Image (cartoon, rainbow, N blue to C red):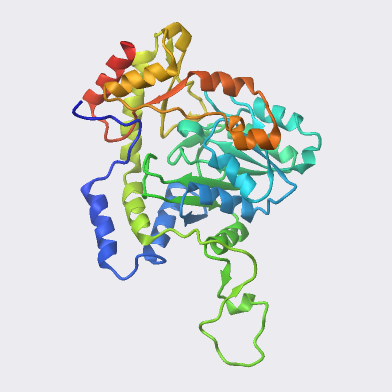
Amino acid sequence: MNEFIHYGRHHIEQDDIEAVCEVLRGDWLTCGALVDEFEKYICKITHAKHAIACSNGTTALHMALLALGIKEGDLVIVPSISFLASANAVRYVGADVVFADVDPDSGLMTPDTFREAIARVKNANKIKAVINVHLAGQCEDLAQIAKIAREYNMYIIEDAAHAIGTNYVDGSKEIHPIGSNAYSDLTTFSFHPVKTVATGEGGAVTTNDDKLAEKLRLLRSHCMVRDASQWTQKSQDSEIKPWYYEMQELGYNYRISDINCALGLSQLKKLDIFKDRRAEIVSVYDEAFQNNPAIKPLKKITSSVVAWHLYILLIDFKKLGKSRSEVMLSLKAKGIGTQVHYIPIYTQPYYKNLYGEMRLPGAEEYYSRCLSIPLYAGLEPYQVENTIMHIKNL
């Protein structure tokens, strides 16, 4: 085996390396101008008023919930198919998770499964927010989900860890970039190396609310208040104290470095190139698997113009005559990496111990069939064809 094709990986080029080296030669490795530039470019792409960059996608979710004032005694609805962080961030603030079922063919929470999750709660007034996860880069009908959330006075957080560059098309055919918050209060992003845009580790929150943006910036950096006009402890003398700051509530060190932002900024400038290459690969895969009786592509959502993060196949392993483990190990032996996105979060021991056993049929049907195959901008055509050949020959 001369090479191994991972299910996803970063795509770093010489201009990315030069951008990072330039920071390393400079005066600021963190808390410098590159963070601000990175945030401005995120705003340019998403059309959001504010972007607050942070250390990773999980801290972005944590800060979003803190900024909204979600706390112990509150409930937050989270789709059952997502990475652990989507639910764990709710527990970080002391609130409880209500797991929503998903469409078994897309893995996404739908307006119907959202309503069903609400209906399972005896006191719906305790539900303070919903985290709407955009799996693989796709988003469901944001307008309908927002309409339901507003009926119950819920905040809306879009977990767009997979969806930088995706656009939502509403009923009037108006296009809204994910992160614009046209139908939400906050959107969170991740820039982990397997995502479309990489910073190494990194995340961001976008919002159009000035007060939320100010709160997020404070939370990111220990909640240190340096503006004298906002201090609660007024000095008894007139001496100017340039060193002084106040911490009026608990904050965190969730900052991102200029090194990360230099890489991220260089990558963001190539987002359209990355999107187009990923779309080309998705198109080739779709055609290859469209008439396979045991293997079919993930359901496509018509309201999404997608910047694909993952390519997920839905496989009838019984019809195929092989288990998922056998398929993954067979492909690995041929140099092809695969992964499962995701195990239903409510089946994890922590959540089973916390909330007891539960069954969500859509999530379990989706989980029983899903398998992610290689998708990234640097994937060569022969590697795509090799992957298709070996999957068809299973």
| In-image side of 123 versus 194 (left or right) | right
Residue 10: image x %, image y %? 32, 41
What residue is shown at x 44% (from left), y 41% (from top)? 164
Most distant residue in the right direction: 123
| In-image side of 328 versus 230 (left or right) | left
Which of 21 and 111 lies nearest the eye of the viewer?
A: 21
Q: In this view, does 240 lie above or below 354?
A: below
In the picture, the quarter occupied by the C terminus is: top left
Which quadrant would residue 325 be assigned to in this image?
top left
Which quadrant would residue 115 be assigned to in this image?
top right
Which quadrant would residue 364 be assigned to in this image?
top right
What residue is shown at x 63% (from left), y 93% (from top)? 237
Residue 313: image x %, image y %? 43, 20
Which of 165 and 234 lies nearest the eye of the viewer?
A: 234
Which of 74 and 4 lies nearest the eye of the viewer?
A: 4
Any part of residue 284 in sight: no
Residue 12: image x %, image y %? 27, 45
What residue is shown at x 42% (from left), y 66% (from top)? 31
What residue is shown at x 44% (from left), y 32% (from top)? 306
In the picture, the quarter occupied by the N terminus is: top left
